[in-house]
């Protein structure tokens, strides 16, 4: 039985640019980097080294050649934060494309795009303690 989401595969055109975006602009960390020596390179990133879920950045072109049947479109990712306004301000300062702050029944949310125009959402989760 599945009981936890471990990793999210994100297929990108330029892995180095994707790493720079996620680490320098969003504040994620590189957890690990692997290269099989045959063109398959993957980079694991996450909000912190203790994060339970991470993103694996894969080379879209290489994966498409290996597995042409796969849909390599961007997965829909929803991140959580306890400081939505602070994150919105940081991303704006970093010249990241951000959408409007939207009020939903479950809380405030906005989206942002990486350098390849993949969009991601962030929702504010209030500390329940």
Image: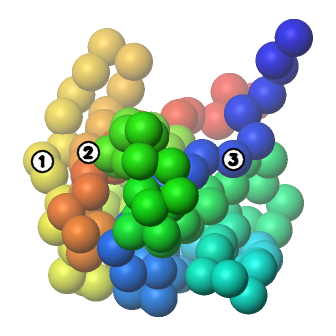
Which corner quadrant of the image does residue 109 belong to? Answer: top left
71 relative position to 37: left or right: left
Secondary structure beneath label 3? strand
Q: Earlier in the sequence, mark 2 or mark 1?
A: 1
Q: Position of residue 119 (x, y in %)?
A: 26, 51
Q: CA distance from mark 1 to mark 3?
A: 28 Å
Residue that label 3 marks: 7
29 relative position to 115: left or right: right
Residue that label 1 marks: 100
Tell me if mark 1 has few (under 14), some (14-19) or many (20+) residues whose alpha carbon lies within 10 angstroms of its own. few
Colouring used for the render: rainbow
For this rendering, which residue is in front, 40 or 47?
40
Judged from this view, the residue extending furthest toward the left is 100
Q: CA distance from mark 2 to mark 3?
A: 22 Å
Tell me if mark 3 has few (under 14), some (14-19) or many (20+) residues whose alpha carbon lies within 10 angstroms of its own. some
Query: Do the numbered discs 1 and 3 sit on residues whose CB atoms are within 8 Å?
Result: no
Which corner quadrant of the image does residue 36 belong to? Answer: bottom right
| Residue at point 38%, 81% (across, down) | 14
Secondary structure beneath label 1? loop
**In the displayed structure, would residue 81 be above or below residue 63?**
above
| Residue at point 81%, 68% (across, down) | 49
Secondary structure beneath label 2? strand
Residue that label 2 marks: 110
Q: Earlier in the sequence, mark 2 or mark 3?
A: 3
Please give the count of numbered marks on the rendered protein.
3
In front of the other: label 2 or label 3?
A: 3
Q: Position of residue 95 (x, y in %)?
A: 20, 81
In front of the other: label 1 or label 3?
A: 3
**In the displayed structure, would residue 103 be above or below residue 111?**
above
Query: Do the numbered discs 2 and 1 sit on residues whose CB atoms are within 8 Å?
Result: yes
């Amino acid at each position: 039985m599945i009981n936890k989401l471990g990793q999210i595969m994100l297929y990108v055109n330029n892995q180095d640019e994707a790493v720079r975006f996620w680490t320098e602009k969003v504040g994620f960390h590189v957890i690990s980097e692997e290269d099989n020596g045959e063109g398959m390179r993957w980079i694991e990133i996450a909000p912190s080294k203790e994060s339970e879920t991470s993103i694996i950045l894969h080379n879209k072109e290489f994966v498409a050649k290996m597995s042409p049947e796969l849909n390599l479109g961007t997965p829909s990712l929803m991140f959580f934060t306890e400081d939505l306004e602070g994150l919105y301000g940081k991303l704006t300062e970093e010249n990241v494309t951000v959408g409007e702050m939207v009020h939903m029944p479950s809380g405030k949310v906005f989206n942002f795009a990486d350098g390849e125009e993949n969009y991601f959402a962030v929702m504010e989760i209030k500390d329940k303690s």
